[in-house]
Image: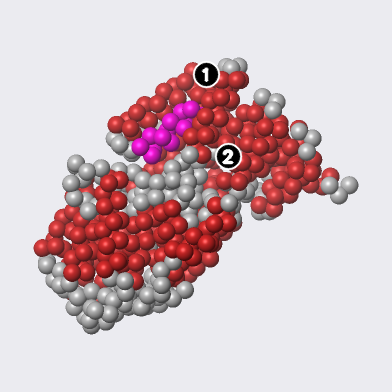
Amino acid sequence: MLRSLVSATLASLVLAPLPARAQHEAPAAHQHAAGAGHEQLGTVDFATSCSAAAKPVFNRAVALLHSFEFGDAIKGFTATLAADPSCAMAEWGIALSRWGNPFNLAQRAPGPLQEGLAAALRGKALKPATPREQAYLDAVAALFTSADTIDQRTRIVAYRDAMAAVAAANPADVEAQIFYALSIAASHTPSDKTYANLLKAAAILEGLIEKYPDHPGLAHYIIHSYDVPALADHALVAARRYATIAPSAPHALHMPSHTFTRVGSWQESIDTNIASANAARAVGATAEELHAMDYQAYAALQTGQDAIARELVAALPAIKARFDADAVTGAAPGSAGLFAMASIPARYALERGDWKAAAALTPEPTRFLYPEAQTWFAKALGAAHGGDAAATRAAIAELLRIRDELTAKKEAYWAEQADIQRRAASAWLALAEGRTADALTEMVAAAQAEDGTDKAAVTPGPLAPARELVGEMLLQAGKADEALQAFEATLAKEPNRFRALSGAIRAATLAGRTDTARRHAQTLLAICAKADTPSRPELAAAKALAASASR
């Protein structure tokens, strides 16, 4: 029902067409256009009172900012100040770049908060030439002001509301509308299943993109605005457009895979993440490289291309040696790089059901904690499947510790994710100990908790979706019909997942629903058209089942 309402909702919210620039600010801004030299970042035309010499430098920096290339954007805004030391909007750009990825659900560190506030204050001290520019600076300052006493969520909402005022006061300012839409999307909470903020943001962006098809922010933020299971297919046009708009930005090459992951278009995800990782490596954006690798590994494992994932695991030690978690580069913060280094080997073990390898993983503590939780969760599942109750309990204790420490650090989202993992691990321990009823009760509770939230942008998906684990547990308990329901519920949220499809095939076969089993087998074979040879046993079984339909 939600999908059927999306188009109507967008139509009711969409803004009227806007002129290309704010008319009251002259002279007209220069554009940073795709194809300037060999660099392609899209087209940005941001009117400011800065000097003519500073305008193209500023617009290039804004183009980088729209693609979340924060390190290069800061360099660009600094270059703008060199061209025009009175350009207050350059300090606005530095401040917003210091905030980093607005879809990063983690608490911001003190250093970037101090640097962002300092930039906003420097911009104000330059006495912006127009009330519009003053309003931009006042808005960005809300993200950083009184960070020690005002919680992050409140500051995000304050920034959104301030940008609403900027957009309302300057209806001809396209950039104001775009940054306002971004602030709306970034204020979405994973527990809001009405998606009201995401739909509102998408309506603004969709109302502009046909008039400004080469603007990097429009395609980028449309993908983010639809980056939930119920809406993801609405982003496909933007996803396939964005990489062609700004191919010089590694994140623009990666971002389409958010949509491809949501709809289960695995080969498209693999291809775009290879391009993104290569581009990120070339410019030293190692966190972005790792982030792309995590998405690539996830997609490869869904298609049975395990050799690709194995090569990514093997590449991690060399990448780790050159990785600086504190460097400000692209869209992916250092924590995303650490998350990827923990998640890629965990995925490689769990997706293939290699429980021994999962149990043998070695956690690496980080100050962010939630990357470490991925390894402990994989270890817990591996140990439980291997019958090692003591090791499972030890991993569960670590997940409990991480949850409590994240709670103390006010990392509510990641604390909840760690608790979902703890509950799932506890369920599998109960099953290993023969407490089947308790195991199913706890596993269903974990799945319900996961259904009530959503994945963060840092990850392509859970290491093992809780609803999928319910299905696997029900299969072990001999409840094939219920298991099939759980696997199909997983597929509704996470389309074309290998383990959910193979589980559905087993469950349907055991339940005597041969036609359903064959349908899922055909889907699995289609998404695994490029699978390794020899392939996983599940594919051989799917081939035999599909072949039986013609006999």
Indicate the position of residue 265 as horizontal and vertical percent values. 59, 55
Residue carrying label 1: 389
Give the residue at x 33% y 62%. Answer: 180
Mark identifier at residue 172:
none
Q: Name the residue nearer the viewer: 36 or 465.
A: 465
Q: Name the residue nearer the viewer: 286 or 8.
A: 8
Give the residue at x 58% y 56%. Answer: 4
What kind of residue is marked 1? Ala
Whether residue 5 is visible here, answered yes or no, is yes
The correct choice, above or below, for 207 with respect to 68 in the image is: below
The correct choice, above or below, for 102 with respect to 451 in the image is: below
Count of marks overlaid on the render: 2
Give the residue at x 53% y 25%. Answer: 442
Residue carrying label 2: 351
* Bounds of the magenta segment: 412-424
Q: Residues within 10 Å of mark 1 (few under 14, many from 20)?
A: some
Q: Name the residue nearer the viewer: 104 or 376.
A: 104
**C-alpha gap between disc 2 and disc 1:** 22 Å
